[in-house]
Image (spheres, helix red, strand yellow):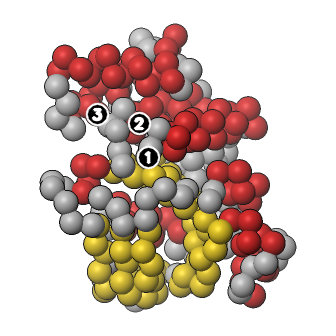
Amino acid sequence: MLPLTLNNLCFAIDGRTIIDHVSVEIGSGPRTIILGSNGAGKSILMRLCHGLLRPTAGTLEWRSGNGDPRRRQAMVFQRPVMLRRSALANIVYGLKLAGIDPTERELRARDVLEAVGLAALADQPARVLSGGEQQRLALARAWALGPEVLFLDEPTANLDPGSTRDIESIISAIHAAGTKIIMTTHNLGQARRLGDEILFLSEGRLVERSPVERFFREPASTEAAQFIRGELPWQ
């Protein structure tokens, strides 16, 4: 399905430009971290890529292939939505919507619950789980679909350090299993731990793309250097 090609992609609302002529090709393999100051457009860009929003100008194209590319990607949000059913049933329902064979759904769901450390909570109502447990469940629900690309929008925001470590371990496992990770974060340490390349946005423009270590060692733009030094607000 990859690469994903953005060509002069724009998004505006109420006369305000949020994404401003972004052109980039994102390939498989490296984990891509999107960074930028508060209001830079990171979350909007991810929603455009995932198909939740339509660009007001420019194009967004997945590599040609069979079927709808939206069926081969998933997204996990900062505040996941939990259905009024058990942890296991949350995953099974997602697999049902994806058209997975009924005989495979529960087995696959239990496998991913085990992988994220929630097997003992399979029958618990999802909405009574802690914030960290709900985020692990959201990752399991996405992982069960076997996506080629997983979009993650601030997946550890407002979580304690222990829960953050758990989420980072799961993200690393999903990547190791062959899924492309595209992620936003406000945590620079996390960006270094989980990223292979950085896309840096400033006021809706893509001003820098760089391998993660080079980005932090030798930022190529004034905006990125200020961001790393903490002179710009984080999102």
Can residue 131 be seen in the rendering of this structure?
Answer: no
The location of residue 192, given as percent across then percent down, is 72, 57
Measure the alpha-carbon separation of dots 3 and 2.
Answer: 11 Å
Residue located at (28% from left, 72% from top): 61
Mark 1 — residue?
Answer: 179
Q: Are marks 2 and 1 in contact (CB under 8 Å)?
A: yes
Q: Are marks 3 and 2 in contact (CB under 8 Å)?
A: no
Q: Quadrant of the N terminus?
A: bottom left
Residue located at (76% from left, 55% from top): 189
Q: Alpha-carbon neighbours of circle 2 within 10 Å: few (<14), some, or many (≥20)?
A: many
Q: Alpha-carbon neighbours of circle 3 within 10 Å: few (<14), some, or many (≥20)?
A: some
Of callouts 1 and 3, the N-terminal one: 3
Measure the alpha-carbon separation of dots 1 and 3.
Answer: 18 Å
Residue located at (63% from left, 57% from top): 195
Q: Judge whether 175 appears above or below 230 on screen.
A: above
The location of residue 38, given as percent across then percent down, is 64, 71
Mark 2 — residue?
Answer: 143
Give the residue type at disc 1.
Answer: Thr
Q: Secondary structure at mark 2?
A: helix
Measure the alpha-carbon separation of dots 2 and 1.
Answer: 9 Å
Q: Are marks 1 and 3 in contact (CB under 8 Å)?
A: no
Q: Judge whether 51 appears above or below 189 on screen.
A: below
Quarter location, residue 197: bottom right
Mark 3 — residue?
Answer: 94
Quarter location, residue 160: top right
Looking at the rendered image, the disc whose residue lies closer to the viewer, 2 or 1, is 1
Give the residue type at disc 2.
Answer: Trp
Question: Does 192 sit left or right of 141 as displayed?
Answer: right
**Residue 129: mark in rendering:** none
